[in-house]
Image (tube, rainbow, N blue to C red):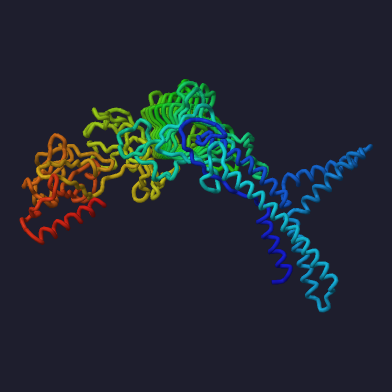
Amino acid sequence: MPASQSRVLLLGLLTGSLITTATWADTVVVNTTTDENNIDNTSCSIREAVSYLKAKNDKKAIIDEEIAVIAGTSLKNSSQLTIAKNALTDEKAKTSPNSSEISRLEKEIADLTNVINNGLFSLNIQLAQKTDELNKEKSKSTPDNNLIASYDAAINTLKDQIKQKETERTQKESDLLVYRLKGLYGCISFDFNTADNVSLYANLGTYSIDSTITLPFSLNFALFGADASSSAVGIINLEDTTNPDALPRTILKATASHNIFIIDDGKDNDHDNNPATSNQYITVTFNNIDFLGCDNNCATNGGIILNKEFLTITNSVIAKGVATEKGGAIYNAANSVFSIKNSVIKNNRAESGSAIFSEDANLALSSSLIADNETTNINNGVITLNKTLKASPYAPINPLIENSTISGNKGIGLNIQEGIFVNTSTVVQNTVGISFNSGLPTVYNSIIADNSTLDCQSFAPIPADNKAYFANNLSVINKGCPTTNVFNNILISNNGTETLMAATDSKGHCVAPPAVGLLCPLANNGGLTRTHKPRLLASYTKLNDSVIVNKGFNVNKNSAGLACSSLDQRGKPRENNENACDIGAVELISGLSSSRQGDDIVFGQIKRFSPLENLGDAELLPAELCANFLGAGEYINGCIRVIDLPRHGQASIDTQTGELLYSTTKTDFHGFDTFSYGVITTLSRFNDANNDRTLTTSVRVVSEPPSSPPSKALDNGANGIFSILMLSLVAIWRRIYRGQ
């Protein structure tokens, strides 16, 4: 490689290695639910973790600057040098210059220049230059030995200087490492990452927050040793106790009249079109962390969180925040960004934006439930966007409300502006559904219906030449939603078979067909949040009779507006191929064409199997409709019937509960038995093939003694080695089956 190329390569490597300072970040594990801030104690609270990380970051900033000075790359020194040079020029240009000021500035310039020129970056450049000159001299036919000696001496001197500077830099990095390992506030770094992390133990339950905590730097909050997928088991609902397998929720609770967090680095986020002159956001994330506000005038703005940066919340519940003015749960300040996914915002209160108040349209809401929030002025929004999106190519999100349910809130469900899109969402049973504040609506594939006053309010007139502003939506007639210059929208009467919300039975479930109602009340229908499940009425004679199913954007037809998202609120895939997707936050999912059930019983036990386990989002077909598919006969709901009889027992149907009953013929039968049964649902009846209309479930039952293994044969009376072999096979089969 020629010397010149070597020099260029060396300079490139130097540029990459010397300018950057240490980027170590820490993970701190919180081990107490008590709120404390004691620098000398041994326990680590949330507040102490933040204090430790701030102290570490302050210390790191100092050391980083010291390392930058050693490297000769200090931006502070470079800025001071430029200022001093300009001041010297200005002073010399005066009619009566101050000689003492000139001398002071000249000395300051010389000192700063000397520091910069004696930094690692400059020394290595000088070394590269001298090495290049030495190699050139050596390559001559008659090299100058005296000149070579002077180059060698200069190179050795530079190497000594570089070694000394590298030692200084290493010592500074060691100082930071010692500082971090020592710990403060009872907190010690768990490991070193690319971003600061606060980890919470899930099994500790509720963490008390006695006063507001300010977060002035980028930080991630999550559960210790868990990720989003593994820790969010079951529906995320603070009051939900129906799932015994759900992990305990980790809750941050305000213990007095205050919000929990203010996220602010103290700098204005004035993002213009020049990223070099725009302050960058700090980023704060919460994953699997729940929030409980003070429930009584927690703050003026932001009852739980006041955000002035870039906030992301995932798999969380945010409840009982109260703001006297804006943002009962979350206040998103001007030029700030808020993204929330797979979460629940409920039971919050404010004059405006009882759930979320955002000064700009910098909001991304997806796969979430906004329910039971109260806007004290019902003319204001539950989710309020005060302004349109600031026009900047450096906005970090796409403003979008998608796959979300806004239900049962007091106020305007979505009081928003132009610049944000609403897609595949369900906005029902609020005071008012959606308002765009006299802006053009951008709403697609959504249900906006059954809101007590109006479904739509304050929409700008849609241009006649562009119907792609309000498309593929369902709303109630004469409830304010646009009816001219729109595309493929459906209006219902909200009466009779077009009643939107179904009634509930004593258990809070949808009243079974033939009862009407296009949506079921909020319930756990799968996924992390409660949803309104769509229904197929018994009165439908074909699938196309539904005003919800397959009424969304169709990629294969001349549709307008936005395409449906690939997943619904529950994370289930949507159809976007031969059929259009379903409108609203939930895609109707059919049951499997076949499934399996099984369990162990002891001698003499009667086992019940429910046909409801394999229905998906469908319901059992009313008994009076079964004859249309199976011929004349006596039926119960679901057209339930035994298809394959068991060999060693009896299978029957409990006509009162609709359950399948199994019992052995012999009270001492030891082994396994199988049978199958079929049901027809409100959805499977529309399948093209007759044999596809029945959902078939195979059942396997293992019968065994109540205590010690018997000496009797399995199912045929055989004895000896054959019996032992069969017992072994049964044991193996049971292990395999249970593992499925």
Farthest residue toward the right? Answer: 96
Q: Nearer the viewer, residue 703 or 424?
A: 703
Left or right: 218 as drawn, with respect to 564:
right
Whether residue 468 is visible to the viewer of this picture, yes or no, is no
Where does the image place residue 667, in percent across and percent down from the top left?
7, 45
Q: Nearer the viewer, residue 334 or 548?
A: 334
Q: Quadrant of residue 228?
A: top left
Where does the image place residue 167, in percent across and percent down from the top left?
69, 54
Left or right: 277 as drawn, with respect to 449:
right
**Which residue appears at 86% of the width and 45% of the height?**
107
Q: Nearer the viewer, residue 179 or 324?
A: 179
Q: Tell me if residue 537 comes above or below residue 175 in the rendering.
A: above
Q: Quadrant of residue 581?
A: top left
For the N terminus, which image quadrant?
bottom right
Q: Tell me if residue 125 comes above or below residue 616 in the rendering.
A: below
Label count reads 0
Where does the image place residue 68, in percent across and percent down from the top left?
70, 49
Whether residue 731 is visible to the viewer of this picture, yes or no, is yes
Left or right: 231 as drawn, with respect to 688:
right
Where does the image place residue 189, in percent across and percent down from the top left?
53, 44
Left or right: 70 as drawn, with respect to 143:
left
